[in-house]
Amino acid sequence: MAELVFFSGTMDCGKSTLALQMDHNHAARGRVGLIFTKMDRAGANVLSSRLGLSTGALEVSDDLDFWESIVERATAGQRIDYLICDEAQFYTGEQVEQLARAVDEMEIDVFAFGITADFRTELFPGSKRLIELADRVEVLQVEALCWCGRKATTNARVLDGSMVVEGEQVVVGDTKPGTTGLVEYEVLCRRHYMRRMTSHAARAAALSPEVLPFDLEVCPLPSLPITQAD
Ligand SMILES: [Zn+2]
């Protein structure tokens, strides 16, 4: 019985690494799959993991119809046993429904990987629909860690060095400074997300003599070198 499985987590929790491993495991058993991704940090048509592995992938555009695309390939004689769908948070709700249909009507396993919530802690549309429709939702066990060492459950957006909680939902990180500024992301525990305390802000607070950060006793700073490179 084919399944729609959603592997979810924060950034840095190893989703893309698991996606690559999943593809390897199924291919090693003689199964044939297609790999999809959307706006991977390494560019279009590639699925990359932070550990340095990568593979070619089909880029998902907003107007891609998964169902039509799969039916077309199957009609042309292509065998498809499973789909690896990375960065699934960026897919539309409709595309997730097309994936569910492929599971139900074509017996194709769909393994979707994605971040659940955006930098405002609100669900991405693709992730929302996956949580609603998936046969299983697996929360990845490789936990990303906040700078304080706690489990990181949020993805903070840092714009020109300062954490922001308003703005467009999708802005790909590590972009070059331009009109919109330099956008970076940092995983944080909820406590530090709520306090807007990124690792940079925490270091600044710890180095400033007039500020005694009230939560450092319960949430100690990691040992850091005295001199920081900017
Ligand atoms: Zn923390």
Image (spheres, rainbow, N blue to C red):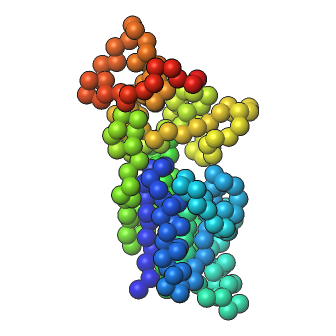
The C terminus, quarter of image: top right
Residue 136 can be seen in this image: yes
In the image, residue 63 sits, relative to residue 177, either above or below, namely below
Where residue 197 sits: x, y (%)? 43, 28
Asked whether 20 or 125 is in front, the reply is 20
Where residue 189 sits: x, y (%)? 37, 39
Residue at (53, 31) in percent of width and height: 164
In the image, residue 93 sits, relative to residue 103, either above or below, namely above
Asked whether 25 or 171 is in front, the reply is 25
Asked whether 220 or 79 is in front, the reply is 220
Residue at (53, 55) in percent of width and height: 51
Farthest left residue in view: 218
Location of residue 135 (image quadrant)? bottom left
In the image, residue 53 sits, relative to residue 202, either above or below, namely below
With 142 as the anchor, is 11 left or right in this view? Answer: right
Residue 100 can be seen in this image: no
The total of numbered circles placed on residues is 0
Where residue 184 sits: x, y (%)? 58, 37
Residue at (37, 64) in percent of width and height: 138
The N terminus, quarter of image: bottom left
Farthest top residue in view: 210
In the image, residue 186 sits, relative to residue 107, either above or below, namely above
Residue at (63, 59) in percent of width and height: 38
